Image (cartoon, grey):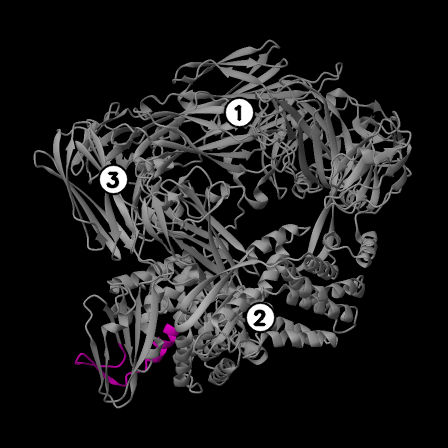
């Protein structure tokens, strides 16, 4: 190993200096704690001393951070850090604070490291943290003795022993850098000794240990010598890991600290071998402009290295730098160049090229080449000429031509042979299978200048002779050139020679084919047109009429699989032949004005809810109208409604029926704990087909807005950075009052874009332009005036220079008096600083280009004003991108570093004209390519585009036709009008004008002169709600002028006014009304046709709710009569024409013919108004009356009516202001926690009440305290006032807050809300056993509730033989779990199948409720069923968990046996899935838990083969990875009657349970030893295994449960199943409770309120016991803890500044980013949930209700994506799932300080869902929010 001992010499020599040199004495201070102990973490004991000496000993020892002095024994305990403070009389403790602190020292050291080392540092810290667990010393070990022992071992060269002692010493105290350094040196000495040994070479692992130790030493070191030594050791350790860049940089950093001649010499050797150097040089000779590149080992520091590069006698050359290579451009083919790269060129790491490098390079001519110009295939027959072939430096091409017959073309197209490149092998295969070789020979190629591309025309007529029906393919290769391998592609061109131009339109009325002459552009009548399927069958045949038109019925176009249309073939009697591939994409006409919703099919459905967001527990009202494409009602058709949750799970589905004229209505109640996020409703006429329509809505914990808030800009101009950009703001309260003196805040989100709306299809900017999205808080940008208006002055930060377009999203927030903010967004482009270059590929996508074809692009240059401008000298380069990988083994395994280089393929210059574009291109082979374009001058810009060639897709490219300018004379028409279509062509020709929607409505051909024409068209009823008027202009070819045939297409949408099909709906409502009473909405239809039945659905919704999601009033007439996308697909072959007039004729020479638990979400503190009438029938006069009962509400209600008949639809809306004459608004926090102190903001606005004295009083429920609040107020009319009334949270619950305002006339107005009071932490559960001897008794007293908050707590009691399993407590714990994954859902419901009597007894639910839990669970897990029959954890997209499949199927089988309805099809699919997975399951030596579960389930269902059971018993019983798996195999054998083998399997399971080991590492079966014990017991009891001692096993399980602090749902569920199985046969013991005699199992539940002592008497003959379990909320929040996780919670301002929310500086309206960072010590189950309860004064800014993306918008923050996330009223919840080891996990959210007061800040928690002992929580605290200065 290079460097081993030589590098160590100086390191060890310096080690002795560490102690002597030491660190500069740090300043220390001591915080003395009287009568306090700091238990634990002792590393040294000083006996017979006093307090002063003890303190001095700790001060003087740099590794001492705390001490405890015991004045009774005069002992002094020195500690590595301070433990938890504990009261201890006679002890004095001290905490030492050193300046600088260890954290500061570590931060400074980390900044000194010469490379990014975060991953290594995290590993080193984790190593140090784990030492007390991995290397704990023997009890009573002394730190100093361990260090001395290690030094002795080192001196004796016993490095393994030294490492053991050093690690044990560091487990006691990890603060001494010298000990870390010594450990690193010992590990390196040992690595050097074993390196290269045939056995025992663990040098790599030792180097990892040395890296961890050296980094820990360096991070703790302060002296120069110590730091240098640590860096040397670190560099030496990384040598073993081949991290040479880091090694060199680290050795240099060490030498910069302390000079060392020996190390300098050694470093020179390392640099010479592994340092910065030239590794290669390449010549890009194949480009038209060649270049020479020198490739370096590392990326370069500078982009301008011209001073370091010289080229002798070549003044025209220039130097360009690219990442890791320097390229000399301007060289010439055939030239030789002497190049010098001078020493001193720097790498990005600061390394320098040590010496000059001289290169002598010859640039050869371009290799001879032949190729075909494009992938088109149609040669117009009327132009003569030949097939163009391009060549470079080639004289003669060997050419072969093959023909594929007409009946073989469909197969060639289907199999991707057609238009693909052919190898020699492929060509012979074509000749043998589907065609024949028709000519082989040589072609003399035109020869231009050397290295230039020339074009030659191959005279096809002279080679092939008479053209026959079918397609031809020609291959070419250079004569005399080595052909390469047999399978390498040759230059290939497919072609037909024809005069037939084909155009197709496909829609609901079939496929329309149009055949026109390419030569004359006239229709060709009498042509035989065939529709050919993929399977080569002829689907239909027709003759073209005088219009050249042939039509195929719609059914022929709808075939699937082999019957799908593939080709349209046209053939004349004279033998002319052409075909069109129907599988290619249709024309993309979005740039011609095609827009709107997709054209409907036979059924057109409009579906809407009455609003966009709901709180859990509310009802969603769905209304839908079903029509045909002409907007006539489709009646009496049942629809299936599917409701999908945010996680992709289908929560339910139901059939809904027509309720009148094709209308559907459904009221959908949301559960009280419905999942937050975006829900989707889908409606189907056929559940197996695509949905007819879908609509989405949110479920969130929201508060309605109280203000109307509108924003606008004076113009649509781009925002200019650095300048004031004005945004107009208008605000008013929704009850009609003005909104004066409110602050307007803003954030600016600037995002890079790659597109511009006015230039569709173009990509702008360089790929390597690294500009990122930035979010900048702009603070307060305005304040409303007396009328509620403001001008927000927004200044965007200066944008960095970029080649990409920028877009600014301004988030404006209007801050209400309550402290809550209302957000609006406005988006504008950012004024560009330079021109922008757009690149549009003339092929389908970046992966859709065939190898060997020409990559063509269109360029446009766009000025900052958004105009296409003229630009000359546009430089372009097409390069092949090559990536190589440099592999090295890092701390987490093998890693690689990608090294990317480019090789020029072609280059040139181009020029655009004003308003125009330019096209360029070059041939490409297989690989990845990059086009780079740049402009010169002061306004220079650049763009790039990457794509792949060789990944050919036959559908690539739609060959969209040229644009024909068309215009209609009016915006809309009525039936009977004449629409005049004006054609403004670029050339004269014949136009085919058609009126189309999803079918051809009308068609005519017109001659169009060069100056244009106008075509009159009669508007008929067939035009429906509107149609597209299209014109296809055909131009004939002209051989004399060498002009190709052409076509151009234009279209315009003609809107047809619906007339009486649009109902004239009017709504009559009061402009203003009072709350707490009803109001009437009168609906009238002004144009209802006589005798027609009409219906209406009316909704009345708070405008403050609608504004949250910008919900638009449902308008069915806009849906049915608005513009739709074009409903027909247009294709033609004009985009595939080959120009035969190119090139010089080539001479041919023939070669002859060829043959967590919750108290519930706090209630809303505001009244929600969302009312719906359902479907109401209109009377014969066209009227309907709908009455709505209003609650106590203040604001604006928007009344929305949607009316319809069988032939017409319409809508109307109006707003109703709802308010009292004196408006009273209550603004409390959204909830409180116990002990919170805040205020209730009461705002009173005398809008229209009398002037005078008003009385006010406030009353609250017992859980909310407030001083006696009553007052008298003087209010004049129009006057406003505000009061702040104190509130304190006292008791958990939802409590009324009632304010009464008495007017001068004695009338009273009452405002009431519910205010939730929540605990400061999660509930805790404690249990204890009470033994009761035969004839004895016991009492359970109220002391059981000690330590719990008043008013909380429940007690469950279990008495009897299996009391210790605590059945009541387990049932309650399962019922509390809030998350709805498949495992949790099944686990909650499974025990209820057997223990419903107990569940009912303890109050989990009533009988019907218990049944519903099971029914809902069945529905929930079936909604997660995958297409294969398995089950996903969170949804059907999350499948692939074989064991979970077995568990859920087990639940379904048991539920079916218990009498619950389980759909047979779904259960059958679940069993099929298990059987299928079993059939291809891999064999195993230690595992198979999923296989065992599948065998067990299939045995329950009678679907497993006995042979399989016996195989796994005989061959794999001992290989099963868990006792539960063995027991499940035994249960399966028992089900099949094999009692002997079943008993042996169960005995093996019990024996496995007795083995040592916890089995609590990562398990993919959600298991643990406790779970397995419970599962074995449950199955053994169920299947009555005589060989299993059930009592002993039950006792073992009970002991394990007693020891477990936390348990998972799996552990609880299987324990309950065990209890149920045991309890079925248990009835001994006679118990009395409070004198009432009971026998058998006894379960009871008691609440703390009203609890009285329970007397238990055992009147039986055997001893028994009672298990008492108490659950409640503790009086004090838990202290910070980390058990398998580390968890930190940090707060930042939006600009990234860290802040401490507990320091008392928070003010109302402050916004914070809360960042939660977690790191598991082990993978565990890989499924984690983090919850962060909010202080009541905070409110989450929910990104689902915001225009921004929340915390993810901030560029300074990098986050991980949760599997599930919820932003609730009282907490933030995120779930993560991992399958392999993970590092740090980070999530974040935004909060606003809304309500002033003093609030509890609960601790955040993280837990492993299936290893709940792995958890962590942060400490609780207090947050104080001061009121804003109002």
> Residue 1128: x percent and y percent?
52, 30
Disc 1 target residue? 720
> Residue 1560: x percent and y percent?
51, 71
**SS at mark 3 in the image:** strand
* Residue 535 relative to residue 295: left or right: left
* Residue 1537 seen from this side: yes
Up the image or down, 877 lies above or below 436; here it is above
Which marked residue is nearer to the observer: mark 2 or mark 1?
2
Disc 3 target residue? 1171
Which marked residue is nearer to the observer: mark 1 or mark 3?
1
Label for residue 156?
none
Q: Is residue 321 magenta?
A: no
Question: If the image is split into quadrants, where does the N terminus sit?
Answer: bottom right
Label for residue 171?
2
Q: How many marks?
A: 3
Up the image or down, 247 lies above or below 177; here it is above
Q: Earlier in the sequence, mark 2 or mark 1?
A: 2
The answer to which quarter of the image holds residue 1081 is top left
> Residue 18: x percent and y percent?
68, 64
Tell me which segment is drawn in magenta: 1615-1642
* Residue 1131 relative to residue 333: left or right: left
Which marked residue is nearer to the observer: mark 2 or mark 3?
2
* Residue 848 relative to residue 923: left or right: left
Up the image or down, 188 lies above or below 1294; here it is below
Mark 2 and mark 1: span between their CA atoms? 59 Å
Q: Earlier in the sequence, mark 1 or mark 3?
A: 1
Observer-nearest of 783 and 1148? 783
Observer-nearest of 1384 and 1207? 1384
What residue sits 30% from the left and 29% below the top?
Answer: 739
């Amino acid at each position: 190993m290079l460097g081993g001992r030589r590098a160590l010499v100086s390191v060890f020599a310096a080690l002795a200096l560490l102690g002597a040199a030491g660190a500069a004495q740090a300043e220390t201070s001591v915080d003395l704690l009287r009568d306090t102990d700091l238990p634990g973490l002792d590393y040294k004991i000083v006996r017979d001393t006093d307090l002063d000496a003890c303190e001095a000993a700790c001060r003087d020892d740099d590794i001492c951070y705390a001490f405890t002095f015991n004045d009774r024994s005069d002992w002094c305990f020195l500690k590595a850090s301070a433990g938890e403070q504990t009261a201890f009389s006679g002890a004095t403790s001290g905490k030492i604070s050193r300046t600088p602190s260890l954290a500061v020292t570590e931060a400074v050291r980390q900044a000194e490291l010469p490379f990014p080392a975060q991953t290594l540092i995290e590993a080193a810290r984790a190593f140090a943290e784990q030492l007390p667990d991995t290397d704990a010393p023997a009890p009573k070990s002394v730190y100093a003795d361990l260090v001395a022992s290690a030094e002795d071992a080192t001196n004796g060269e016993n490095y393994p022993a030294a490492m053991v002692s050093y690690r044990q010493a560091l487990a006691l105290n990890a603060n001494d850098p010298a000990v870390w350094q010594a450990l690193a040196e010992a590990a390196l000495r040992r690595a050097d000794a074993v390196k290269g040994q045939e056995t025992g070479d663990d040098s790599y692992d030792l180097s990892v240990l040395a890296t961890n130790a050296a980094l820990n030493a360096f991070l703790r070191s302060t002296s120069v010598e110590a730091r240098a030594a640590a860096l040397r050791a670190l560099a030496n350790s990384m040598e073993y890991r081949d991290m040479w860049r880091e090694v060199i940089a680290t050795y240099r950093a060490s030498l910069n600290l302390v000079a060392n001649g020996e190390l300098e010499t050694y470093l020179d050797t390392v640099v010479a071998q592994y340092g910065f150097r030239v590794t290669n040089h390449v010549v890009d000779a194949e480009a038209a402009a060649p270049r020479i590149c020198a490739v370096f080992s590392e990326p370069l520091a500078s982009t301008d290295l011209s001073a370091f590069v010289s080229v002798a006698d070549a003044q025209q050359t220039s130097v360009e730098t690219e990442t890791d290579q320097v390229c000399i451009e301007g060289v010439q083919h055939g030239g030789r160049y002497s190049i010098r790269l001078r020493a001193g060129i720097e790498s990005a790491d600061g390394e320098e090229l040590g010496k000059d490098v001289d290169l002598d390079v010859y640039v050869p001519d371009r290799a001879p080449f032949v190729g075909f110009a494009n992938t088109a295939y149609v040669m117009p027959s009327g132009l003569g000429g030949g097939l163009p072939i391009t060549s470079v430096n080639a004289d003669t091409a060997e050419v072969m031509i093959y023909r594929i017959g007409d009946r073989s073309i469909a197969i060639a197209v289907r199999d991707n042979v057609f238009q693909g490149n052919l190898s020699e092998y492929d060509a012979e295969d074509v000749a043998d299978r589907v065609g024949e070789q028709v000519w082989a020979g040589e072609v003399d190629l035109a020869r231009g200048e050397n290295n230039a591309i020339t074009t030659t025309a191959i005279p096809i007529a002279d080679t092939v002779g008479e053209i026959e029906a079918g397609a031809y393919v020609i291959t070419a290769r250079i004569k005399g050139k080595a052909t390469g391998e047999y399978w390498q592609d040759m230059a290939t061109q497919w072609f037909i020679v024809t005069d037939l131009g084909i155009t197709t339109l496909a829609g609901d009325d079939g496929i329309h084919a149009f055949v026109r002459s390419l030569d004359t552009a006239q229709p060709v009548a009498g042509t035989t047109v065939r529709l050919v399927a993929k399977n080569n069958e002829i689907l239909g045949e027709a003759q073209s009429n005088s219009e050249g038109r042939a039509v195929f019925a719609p059914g022929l176009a709808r075939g699937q699989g082999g019957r799908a249309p593939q080709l349209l073939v046209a053939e004349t009697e004279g033998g002319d032949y052409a075909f069109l591939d129907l599988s290619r994409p249709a024309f993309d006409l979005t740039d011609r004005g095609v827009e709107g919703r997709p054209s409907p099919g036979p059924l057109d459905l409009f579906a809407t809810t009455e609003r966009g967001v709901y709180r859990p527990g509310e009802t969603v009202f769905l209304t839908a109208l079903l029509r045909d494409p002409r907007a006539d009602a489709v009646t009496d058709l049942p629809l299936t409604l599917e409701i999908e949750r945010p996680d992709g799970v289908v929560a339910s589905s139901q059939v809904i029926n027509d309720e009148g004229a094709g209308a559907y209505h459904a009221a959908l109640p949301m559960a009280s704990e419905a999942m937050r996020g975006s829900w989707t409703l889908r409606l189907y006429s056929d559940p197996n087909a695509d949905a007819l329509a879908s609509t989405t809505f949110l479920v969130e914990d929201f508060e309605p807005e109280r203000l109307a808030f509108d924003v606008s800009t004076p113009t649509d101009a781009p925002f200019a950075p650095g300048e004031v950009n004005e945004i107009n703001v208008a605000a008013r309260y929704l009850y009609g009052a003005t909104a004066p003196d409110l602050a307007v805040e803003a954030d600016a989100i600037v995002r890079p874009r790659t597109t511009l709306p006015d230039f569709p299809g173009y990509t702008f900017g360089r790929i390597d332009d690294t500009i990122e999205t930035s979010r900048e808080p702009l603070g307060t940008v305005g304040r409303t005036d007396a009328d509620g208006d403001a001008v927000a002055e927004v200044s965007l930060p200066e944008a960095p220079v970029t080649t990409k377009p920028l877009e600014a999203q301004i988030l404006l927030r209007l801050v209400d008096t309550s402290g809550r903010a209302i957000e609006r967004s406005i988006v504008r482009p950012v004024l560009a600083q330079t021109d922008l270059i757009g690149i549009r590929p003339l092929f389908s996508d970046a992966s859709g280009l065939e190898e060997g074809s020409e990559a063509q692009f269109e360029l446009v240059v766009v000025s900052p004003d958004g105009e296409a401008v003229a630009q000359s000298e546009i430089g372009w380069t097409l390069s092949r991108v090559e990536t190589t990988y440099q592999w090295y083994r890092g701390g987490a395994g093998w890693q690689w570093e990608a090294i990317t280089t480019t090789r020029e393929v072609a280059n040139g210059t181009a020029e655009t004209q004003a308003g125009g574009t330019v096209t360029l291109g070059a041939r490409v082979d297989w690989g990845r390519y990059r086009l780079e374009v740049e402009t010169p001058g002061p306004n220079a810009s650049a763009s790039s585009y990457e794509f792949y060639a060789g990944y050919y897709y036959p559908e690539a490219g739609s060959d969209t036709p040229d644009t024909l300018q068309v215009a209609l004379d009016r915006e809309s028409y009525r039936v009977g009008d004449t629409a005049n279509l004006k054609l403004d062509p670029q050339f004269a020709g014949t136009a085919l004008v058609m009126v189309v929607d999803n079918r051809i409505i009308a068609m005519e051909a017109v001659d169009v002169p060069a100056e244009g024409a106008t075509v009159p068209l009669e508007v008929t009823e067939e035009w429906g709600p509107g149609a597209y008027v299209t014109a296809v202009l055909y131009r004939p070819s002209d051989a004399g002028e060498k002009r190709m045939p052409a076509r151009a297409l234009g279209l315009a949408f003609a809107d047809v006014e619906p007339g009486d099909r649009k109902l004239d709906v009017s709504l009559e409502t009061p402009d203003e009304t009072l709350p707490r009473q009803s109001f009437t909405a009168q609906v009238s239809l002004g144009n209802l046709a006589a005798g027609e039945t009409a219906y209406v659905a009316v909704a009345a919704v708070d405008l403050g709710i609608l504004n949250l999601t910008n919900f638009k009033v449902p308008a069915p007439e806009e849906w049915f009569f608005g513009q739709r996308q074009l409903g027909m697909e247009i294709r033609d072959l004009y985009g595939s024409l080959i120009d035969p007039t190119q090139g010089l004729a080539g001479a041919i020479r023939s070669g002859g013919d060829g043959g967590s638990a919750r108290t519930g979400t706090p209630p809303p503190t505001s009244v929600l108004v969302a009312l719906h009438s359902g479907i109401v029938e209109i009377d014969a006069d066209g009227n309907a009356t709908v009455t709505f009962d209003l609650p106590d509400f203040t604001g604006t209600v928007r009344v929305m009516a949607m009316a319809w008949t069988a032939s017409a639809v319409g809508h109307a809306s109006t707003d109703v202001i709802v308010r009292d004459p004196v408006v009273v608004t209550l603004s409390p926090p959204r909830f409180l926690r116990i002990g919170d102190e805040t205020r209730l903001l009461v705002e009173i606005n005398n809008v229209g009440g009398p002037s005078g004295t008003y009385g006010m009083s406030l009353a609250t429920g017992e859980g909310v305290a407030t001083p006696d609040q009553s007052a008298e107020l003087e209010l004049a009319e129009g006057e406003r006032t505000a009061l702040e009334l104190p509130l304190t949270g006292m008791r958990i619950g939802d409590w009324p807050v009632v304010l009464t305002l008495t007017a001068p006339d004695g009338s009273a107005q009452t405002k009431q809300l519910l205010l939730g009071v929540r605990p400061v932490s999660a509930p805790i559960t404690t249990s204890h056993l009470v033994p009761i001897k035969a004839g004895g008794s016991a009492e359970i007293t109220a002391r059981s509730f000690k330590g719990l908050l008043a008013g909380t707590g429940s007690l469950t009691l279990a008495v009897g033989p299996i009391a210790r399993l605590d059945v009541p407590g387990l049932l309650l714990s399962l019922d509390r779990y809030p998350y709805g994954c498949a495992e949790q859902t099944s686990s909650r419901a499974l025990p209820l199948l057997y223990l419903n009597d107990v569940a009912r007894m303890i109050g989990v639910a009533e009988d019907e409720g218990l049944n519903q839990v099971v029914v809902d669970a069945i529905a929930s897990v079936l909604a997660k069923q995958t297409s294969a029959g398995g089950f996903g954890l969170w949804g059907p997209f999350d499948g692939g968990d074989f064991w979970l499949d077995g568990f859920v199927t087990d639940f379904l089988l048991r539920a079916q046996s218990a009498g619950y309805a389980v759909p047979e099809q779904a259960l059958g699919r679940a069993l099929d899935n298990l059987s299928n997975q079993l059939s291809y399951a891999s064999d195993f030596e230690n595992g198979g838990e999923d296989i065992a579960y599948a065998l067990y389930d299939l045995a329950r269902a009678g679907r497993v083969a006995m042979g399989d059971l016996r195989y796994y018993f005989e061959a794999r019983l001992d290989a099963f990875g868990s006792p539960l798996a063995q027991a499940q195999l035994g249960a399966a054998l028992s089900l099949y009657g094999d009692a002997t083998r079943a008993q042996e399997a169960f005995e093996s399971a019990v024996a496995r349970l007795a083995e040592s080991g916890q089995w609590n590492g990562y398990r993919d079966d959600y298991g643990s030893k406790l779970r397995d014990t419970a599962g074995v017991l449950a199955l053994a009891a169920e299947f009555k295994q005589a060989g299993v001692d059930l009592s002993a096993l039950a006792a073992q399980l009970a002991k394990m449960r007693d020891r477990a602090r936390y348990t998972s749902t799996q552990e609880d569920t299987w324990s309950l199943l065990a209890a149920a199985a045991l309890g079925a046969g248990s009835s001994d013991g006679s118990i009395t409770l409070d004198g009432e005699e009971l026998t058998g199992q006894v379960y009871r539940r008691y609440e703390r309120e009203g609890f009285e002592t329970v007397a238990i008497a055992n009147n039986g003959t055997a001893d028994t016991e009672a298990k008492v379990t108490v659950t409640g909320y503790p009086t004090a929040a838990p202290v910070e803890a980390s058990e398998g996780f580390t968890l930190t919670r940090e707060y930042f301002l939006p600009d990234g500044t860290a802040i401490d929310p507990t320091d008392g500086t928070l003010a109302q309206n402050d916004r914070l980013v809360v960042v939660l960072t977690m790191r598991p010590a082990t993978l565990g189950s890989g499924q984690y949930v983090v919850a962060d309860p909010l202080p009541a004064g905070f409110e989450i800014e929910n990104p689902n209700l915001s225009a921004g993306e929340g915390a993810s918008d901030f560029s300074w923050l990098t986050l991980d994506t949760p599997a599930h996330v919820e932003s609730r009223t009282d907490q933030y919840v995120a779930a993560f799932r991992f399958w392999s080891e993970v590092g740090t996990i980070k999530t974040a959210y935004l909060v606003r300080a809304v309500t002033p007061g003093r609030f509890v800040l609960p601790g955040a928690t993280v837990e492993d869902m299936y290893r709940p002992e792995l958890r962590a929580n942060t400490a609780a605290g207090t947050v104080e929010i001061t009121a804003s200065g109002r």
